[in-house]
Amino acid sequence: MKEELLKRGKSFAWRFGGMALVALLAFISSNLDLLKLSPEVVGLIGLIVGEITKSINSYFELEQAIGRAVKRLAGRG
């Protein structure tokens, strides 16, 4: 149960990061009037970026690599 919760938390963090990136880009573009994106388009782009980051994470096994690096830095690995 705890392992499943940890997996879901990591997945949420990746998707949240992608959505935050898109929100930041939308904020910048709205302040610069470069792109006129509706909230629906921003949400859709956020979901797409979330899926892309999930694919990149799975392909390169970033979660495991980051976990190993953190353990080494903490002196536990």
Image: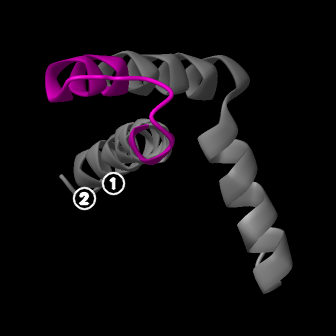
Residue closest to the eye, 45 or 15: 45
Which residue lies at the image location 73% right of the left edge and 69% below the top edge? 70
Q: Is residue 13 left or right of residue 73?
A: left
What residue type is disc 1 on?
Answer: Leu
Q: Is residue 5 left or right of residue 24?
A: left
Secondary structure at badge 1 equals helix
Segment tinted magenta in the rendering? 30-46
Label the magenta part by its dominant secondary structure: helix
Image position, residue 21 (x, y; %): 48, 42
Q: Nearer the viewer, mark 2 or mark 1?
A: 1
Q: Does 48 lie within the magenta span?
A: no
Which residue lies at the image location 31% right of the left edge and 45% below the top edge? 12
Q: Which residue position holds label 1?
A: 6
Image position, residue 6 (x, y; %): 33, 54
Residue closest to the eye, 59 or 25: 25
Which residue lies at the image location 44% right of the left edge and 41% below the top edge? 14
Image position, residue 74 (x, y; %): 77, 83
Q: Which residue position holds label 2?
A: 2
Secondary structure at badge 2 equals helix
Q: Is mark 2 in CB contact (under 8 Å) with mark 1?
A: yes
Residue 36 in which image quadrant: top left
What residue type is disc 2 on?
Answer: Lys
